[in-house]
Amino acid sequence: MKVKIDDIEKVTSLLLSKLKESKGNEIELNNDFYWDISEEELYNPYQDPKNITLDQLSDDLEEIQRLIKSDDAITYDLKRLASILKALSIENRTAF
């Protein structure tokens, strides 16, 4: 499967724009801690995950905010961003 980054960028921008129109520029997230399944087990539907850790949205957000001031992004920052986007989607199911 191939992913077109331009398409992901356009849809992300569209969805965030709609969320902003509906909820405003700042949204309170009610949850902070979340379960994180190891990368090796995440896409293996044939085995129950055993390597589950606890992560924190506030840590993810802190790192994302740091990127605004610097240019030292790494691919792991996509995972942090994805966690925040997932939380936004879960806590704002009927935003628009």
Image: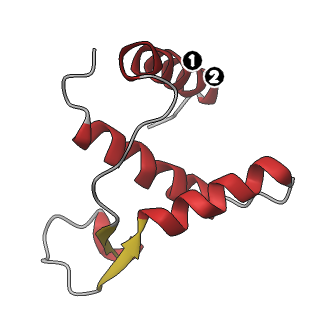
Residue 31 drawn above or below residue 25: below
Question: Could you tell me which secondary element the residue under label 1 belongs to?
Answer: helix
Task: Return the residue nearer the eye: 55 or 51.
Answer: 55
Q: Which mark is residue 6?
A: 2
Rendered image quadrant of residue 40: bottom left
Q: Residues within 10 Å of mark 2 (few under 14, many from 20)?
A: few
Q: How is the image coloured?
A: secondary structure
Q: Position of residue 39 (x, y in %)?
A: 40, 72
Question: Could you tell me which secondary element the residue under label 2 belongs to?
Answer: helix
Rendered image quadrant of residue 50: bottom left
Q: At 46% across and 20% down in the image, what residue appears?
A: 20
Q: At 61% across and 30% down in the image, what residue appears?
A: 5
Whether residue 67 is visible here, answered yes or no, is: yes
Q: Is residue 48 left or right of residue 74?
A: left
Q: Residues within 10 Å of mark 1 (few under 14, many from 20)?
A: few
Q: At 20% across and 30% down in the image, what residue appears?
A: 93
Q: Mark 1–mark 2 contact, CB under 8 Å?
A: yes
Q: Position of residue 83 (x, y in %)?
A: 42, 54
Give the labeled residue for mark 1. Answer: 10
